[in-house]
Amino acid sequence: MTKIAVHLATGFEEVEAISIVDVLRRAELDVIMVSMTDTKTVVGGHQIPIVTDTLFHELDYSTIDVIVLPGGMPGATNLDNHKGLREQILKFNNEKKLLGAICAAPLVLGHLGILKRQKAVCYPGFEKELHGAEVLRDPTTVSDNIVTARGIGVALKFGLKLVEEIIGAEKAEELSKSMLVEY
C-alpha cells in the first residue's frame, strides 16, 4: 500500500493539512502526519495544535512513497529551513517519487531547483520563489512527479488530485461525488 508522509512545521495552514490527510485517508491510503518539531504536537498558523503520528527523525523514509507539504506561513519557511526534509525531497525527486506541495509550500521545491522546466502553481505572491517553473494560475497542476496547488480554497481538490495520481481518476471521481466537491 502507498505510504504518504504529510509534514507539519510550526505555522502550517491547518485547513490545508487536515483536508489533505482527510481526503487521502478516505481513499484508504496509509497517511502519516510527520512533526518537523521536537514534539508530536505541532501548532498551526492559527494557533490550532495538531497531534502528529511521528517525529521527522523517527520516520524511515525508505518506507515512504509520497511526500506532501502543506502551506501556511511561517510553516512553509520552516519546512524550507529543515535540512533533513530538503535532503529527502531531493532524493524523492531523483527517484521520481511523487511530491505534493500547496499554497506557499511549493517554494521549498523551487528553492531546491526541482521546479525548473516544470509547471507549477502556488499562493499568489510566491511565484518568484518557484525558480525556473512555468507558473500557472490553475487551482492544481501536475508536472512529472510533482503536484502543486494554489491554496486553502483548493485543498480538497489538491487531496483529490493526489488520490488521482496515486490510485487513479476513478477513485478520485468517486470521492469527489461522495464529498460534494467539484473535481
Image (tube, grey):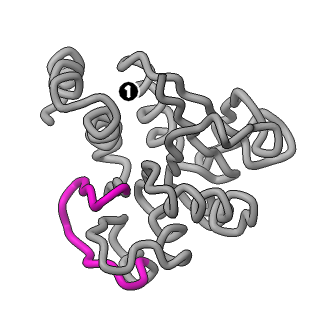
Q: Magenta span has 123?
A: no
Q: Provide residue 112's location: percent of width, then percent of height.
A: 55, 75
Instruction: Judge left or right: residue 104 versus residue 11.
Output: left
With respect to residue 76, does 23 lie above or below? Answer: above
Q: Residue at x 38, y 80 (%)?
A: 116
Q: Quadrant of residue 52?
A: top right
Q: Quadrant of residue 89?
A: bottom right
**Mark 1 element type:** helix
User: For the view shown, which residue lies furthest in the right direction?
Assistant: 38
Q: Residue at x 45, y 65 (%)?
A: 106
**Would you call the spot at circle 1 few (<14 residues within 10 Å), some (14-19), or many (20 or more)?**
many
Q: Residue at x 36, y 65 (%)?
A: 123
Residue nearest the observer in this picture, 143 or 151: 143
Q: Provide residue 170's location: percent of width, then percent of height.
A: 16, 24
Image quarter where the C terminus lies is top left
With respect to residue 15, does 131 lie above or below? Answer: below
With respect to residue 86, does 9 lie above or below? Answer: above
With respect to residue 16, does 151 lie above or below? Answer: below
The amino acid marked with disc number 1 is Val
Q: Provide residue 145's location: percent of width, then percent of height.
A: 36, 55
Residue nearest the observer in this picture, 168 or 20: 168
Question: Is most of the magenta stretch helix, strand or loop?
Answer: loop
Q: Magenta span has 137?
A: yes
Look at mark 1 in the image and give the residue it sits on.
23
Q: Provide residue 120's location: percent of width, then percent of height.
A: 30, 67
The magenta stretch is: 130-145
